[in-house]
Image (cartoon, coloured by chain):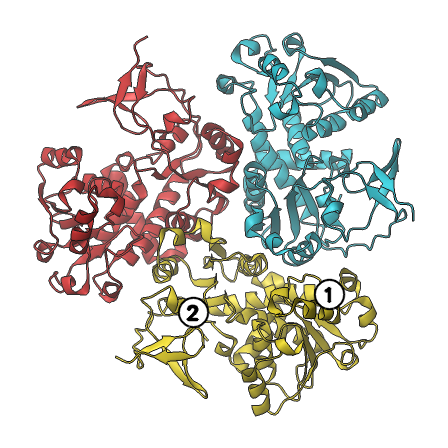
Chain colours: A red, B yellow, C cyan
Amino acid sequence: MRHIIDITDISREEFDRLYSLFGDIIDHPGDYVDCCKGKVLGSLFYEPSTRTNLSFSTAMLRLGGSVVGFSDPGSSSVTKGETLKDTIRIVSGYANMIVMRNPMEGAAKAASLYSPVPIINAGDGGHSHPTQTLADMSTILRLRGSLDGLKIGICGDLKYGRTVHSLVKSLSNYKNVQFYFISPRELALPAYVRDILNEKKQKYFEVSGLDPVLPMLDVLYMTRIQKERFIDPLEYERLRGTYVLDTKKMRNAKKEFLVLHPLPRVDEITNEVDDDPRAAYFTQARFGMYMRMALLLTLSKLGETAPQRIDCDMPKCVCSNAKCITKTETYLPPLCYESDDGARCAFCDKEVSFNSI
Amino acid sequence: MRHIIDITDISREEFDRLYSLFGDIIDHPGDYVDCCKGKVLGSLFYEPSTRTNLSFSTAMLRLGGSVVGFSDPGSSSVTKGETLKDTIRIVSGYANMIVMRNPMEGAAKAASLYSPVPIINAGDGGHSHPTQTLADMSTILRLRGSLDGLKIGICGDLKYGRTVHSLVKSLSNYKNVQFYFISPRELALPAYVRDILNEKKQKYFEVSGLDPVLPMLDVLYMTRIQKERFIDPLEYERLRGTYVLDTKKMRNAKKEFLVLHPLPRVDEITNEVDDDPRAAYFTQARFGMYMRMALLLTLSKLGETAPQRIDCDMPKCVCSNAKCITKTETYLPPLCYESDDGARCAFCDKEVSFNSI
Amino acid sequence: MRHIIDITDISREEFDRLYSLFGDIIDHPGDYVDCCKGKVLGSLFYEPSTRTNLSFSTAMLRLGGSVVGFSDPGSSSVTKGETLKDTIRIVSGYANMIVMRNPMEGAAKAASLYSPVPIINAGDGGHSHPTQTLADMSTILRLRGSLDGLKIGICGDLKYGRTVHSLVKSLSNYKNVQFYFISPRELALPAYVRDILNEKKQKYFEVSGLDPVLPMLDVLYMTRIQKERFIDPLEYERLRGTYVLDTKKMRNAKKEFLVLHPLPRVDEITNEVDDDPRAAYFTQARFGMYMRMALLLTLSKLGETAPQRIDCDMPKCVCSNAKCITKTETYLPPLCYESDDGARCAFCDKEVSFNSI
C-alpha cells in the first residue's frame, strides 16, 4: 500500500489494520492529536467537493498535521497551463502526502507516476473514489460487528455509480454476503461487476422495486438517481417515487436495520427519516473522517521514494475514453494491461485500441 | 449560553465572564496558545466576508485549534443543492463548533436546530451579528473602563443597521447611558429599539446633525450610509457631507473621545482621522479578534448535545419575510413566538400570518 | 531587514545568515517544527498564484505557525471597495507578518507604510518578487557550493522578466561571475541592468542563440518567452525552437551543469529533460520553500513597530506608470527619490513628472 488510486490498492490485511486503527482513533481521539505533527497534506481539488475536502482536511488537522492546497481550479495555476505532472512534482516537494480530486478519469494514477510521496485518489471523474468505500465498509463493520453474512440492498443508479461498484467488489471478499440490487432495468449493475460476484459465488438478486426486499435487509445503501440518466422522462416520473425511502417504508424494515448513503442526497431519502435511529448516513460521514485519519496516519509513515521510470510495453495503444487523463496530459506514457476482455488503459481502465504504424 | 444566534443569547453575567477572559488573553496571550489544541472550528461562509472570516479563523488558530470550511458559496456543495440541514449535520460531525454567515435571515437559528455542537452566527442577512456587538462593547469597556454613564453618539443609517440595533439593546442594560442618534429623518432608529430605551428609562436624543452634539460625546459610533437607502438622490447629495467625520470635526471632540466603526468604511471617516490617537476602529477590529478567542474558548468546553426535536405549537403560521431562511429551506418547522405586537417568526423575528385550513 | 519589498532590502550579511539558517532547516527539519508556534502569517493574494502561495503557507506551517488570508480577490473585501491601507491595518492587527501578492506595481511598498508588522512582497505586478531571487541564489549556492566564479546563462525574455533583473543584480555582488544573456534582440536585457554590471566590472555576453554558449555554462536559468511580447508573429515562430531546452541540447552541457527555471514552464524545457539529474528546477521550488522558512522565522522575531508617518519632500511629483499602486490607492503620499537619470516613484521605481501649481 503506497498510492491509493483504487480500492484494490488496499489488501484485506491492510484494510483490517486500517479498521483496527480507525476503531482506536474513535475510542481514544486524544492519543492522536500530535501523530502527524510537522507533516503536511497537499490537497489538490481540481473540482469543488465540500464533503470530501473537509473530511480529509479535518482528518489531517485532527492528527496535528497541516493542509495546503486549493479547493477550486480557478485559484490554481491550472489556469496558467501547467501540466499535472509539474504540479505534482512541485507539491510533492512541499507536502508529505497528496490527496487529489480531478474530473478526468485516471488523473490520480497519472499523478502517482511522478510523485515521491503517496497519492490518494479522492475521486477521478466517474472512475474511482476508494476512500468512500473505506468509509462504507468501516461504517457497516463498526455498527453491525461483521461483514460476513450481510444482506445488503443497494438502490438507485447502479450502472454509473462508482461508489456502488467499488463497494460491491469489496464486499464480495467476505463470506455469504447477499446482494439485492434495486434499480430500474436501464440503470442495472454492469456485467463486469456481476461477473465478479459470479466468480466468487456470492448470491445476488436484481429487482426493480424497493418494497418487496426491504424487510429482508440488514443494510440499505441508497444512492441518487439523476434525472439525466433516463432516456425517457416519463419513465423517470413513473419510477422516482419507487426509489424514495420515507418513514412509511421504514416501518417495514428490520429493527436492526441501517440506512447508508454516500451523500449528498437530494430527495431519495425524506427528511423525516433522519430522526429514525436506523438512519446511519450522517454517522457514516463522520466515520469516513475517522477512516481517513487512519489512512493518513498510516501513509504518513512511508516517507519518500523516487518515482520509477515506467516503460511502456505496448507503445501503440490508444485509450478509447474521451474523459481519460491521457487525452489532456499528452506526455503520459500509453500504459495498458491485459484483461479478460482485451487490453485496457492503465489509467482509466477503459478499452484501448492499437495504432498501426 | 450554547448557540450564539443573537446578542440576547449572552446574559450580562456571561458577558462579564467573556470580557474578563478577553482581558486576560490580551495581557497573557502566551497562556492560550494550546487551549483549543485538537479542536476544530467549522467555518461556513455562504457569502464572502474577509474581516469576520479572518477574525474568527485567527482567533481559533491563536488558541492552537484548527479551522476547516469554505469562504465562498461557489466552492461549496450548496451548488449541488444540499440543504442547510444536511450540511450542518455533516460538518457538526467533523467540527467541535461552527461559525456561519449566510445571506438569509434566520439561517443560524435554523442551523442550531440540527447541530449537536455550538453554532455562532457571524451574520444572517440584515438580521443579527452578535460578535460585532461583543467587539463593540468590549472595546469601549477596555479603552474607557466602564459602560455606565457613557455618552455615545451613533451616526449613520440607524434604520437598517443591524450592528446599531444590537449595540443599543446591549448598552441599554447599563446605568445612565445617554444616546445621541444622528441620522437623516428617513433613516432614524426604528420604534422597537426606542421602545426598549423608553422601557429601561435611558435618555436618548435624535438629531440630524453631527456637529452640535460632537463636543458632548465620549464615544462616536460611525456607520456607513448607503446611497441606495435614500429615496431622493438630491437628499443624499445634500446630506452626505454632514455625516463625514474629518480632522476639522475632530477638533471639537473631547480629549478622551473614541471613534468606533464596524468597518469596512467607505468615506464616512476621512483617512486623515486615522492618525488621531482617538481613532479606535482598528483597535476595535483587533479587540474583536480577542473577544472571539474568549468566545471560542468558552464554547469549546461545552461538548456535544443531541439537538432537541422541536414541535411547533402554531403549525399554521407563515413568515411574511421574503428573505427568511424558511423560504428556501422548506423543511423547517414554522416556529413562532408571541411578542407585544403579535406573533413573530422564531428564525428572522419578523411578523407572521396564519393560514386558515 | 524588516519589510522585504525588493531584493535590495536584504544585505549581503543578512543573505548569508538566511542561507545558513536555510541549510540548517534542510539538514535538521525536526528542530524547527515549533519555532513559529502561536505566530500567524497573513497571506493576502490579490491574484492567484498557486506555487508562491503554497510555498509560503507550507513554510509557515512547517514552522508550527498558522496562516490566514485569501488566495483570490473574489472572496476578499476588495470587492466591497476597501482600501489597501484599511485591509493592511486590519490584518496587521491579526497577524504577526504579512505576505502579499498584488497586480499593481508598488503595492507591497504601499502596504509597508501602514503596517506595524513585516510585509513580504510575493510579487507586485511586473515590479519585484524578491523571494524568488532568494530561492534562485540559495539553490545555486547549495548545489554548487559557491557563487563566485559562476558562469551563468540566462535565457528567454530578459527585457520584461522581473526575476531575471533581480537575480542579475544579486549575483553582481559576487566575484568574477560571467553572465551569458541569451535572447532575441527585442527582448534583450534593459540598459539599467547592464549598467549595474558595467559599474561592478562583471563580464557579460549578449547572444541570440543558446547552442554556442551552452557547453561553457555552470548554470542555465531558463525563462518563458511569451508570444505576446513579439511584435512580429513570424519572428516568434522562427525563434521559438531556439530557446527550447531538450535532451539533445543537454548532451552538449557540462557534467556538473544545473538547469533552473522559476516555473511554471510551458514548453521551453521539454518533459524529457526532467529525468536528467542536472535538471534542478523542482529542487529549486523545494529549496524556495525552505528559504521562505528561513525568512519567516527570521522576521517572526522582529515584533511590532508603529509605522512611521512619512512626509513627502516632493509633493508635486506624479508617477508616470499606469500600473502603479498610486493610481488606484489615491490617498498614498506621492513619494519619490532621486536616481542617476532623474526622480523616480518610491513605489514602482518608474519615472515621475512634476505638476506645476
Q: Please give the residue where the numbered disc 1 appears in the rendered image.
A: B269
Tell me: A225 left or right of B147: left
On the image, numbered disc 2 is attached to which residue? B324
**Label 1, residues with CA under 10 Å away: few <14, some 14-19, many ≥20:** many
**Other-residue count near label 2 (Cα within 10 Å), few / some / many at <14 / 14–19 / ≥20:** many
Instruction: Please give the label number shown on residue C75.
Output: none
Q: Amino acid at mark 2?
A: Cys
Nearest the viewer among C1 and C47 is C47
Q: Residue at x 25, y 58 (%)?
A: A280
Residue B67 lies, with reference to residue A328, above or below; the image says: below
Residue B27 in view (yes/no) = no
Closer mark to the observer between disc 2 and disc 1: 2
Amino acid beneath label 1: Ile
Query: Which residue sits at x=38%, y=28%?
Result: A110
The chain under label 2 reads B
Q: Position of residue A51 (x, y in %)?
A: 37, 51
Residue at 56 percent of width and 72 percent of height: B162
Picture quarter with the N terminus of chain A: top left
Mark 1 secondary-structure assignment? loop
Where, by quadrant of the figure, is residue A309 drawn?
A: top left
Quarter of the rendering occupied by the C terminus of chain A: top left
Q: Residue furthest right?
A: C357
Disc 2, SS: loop
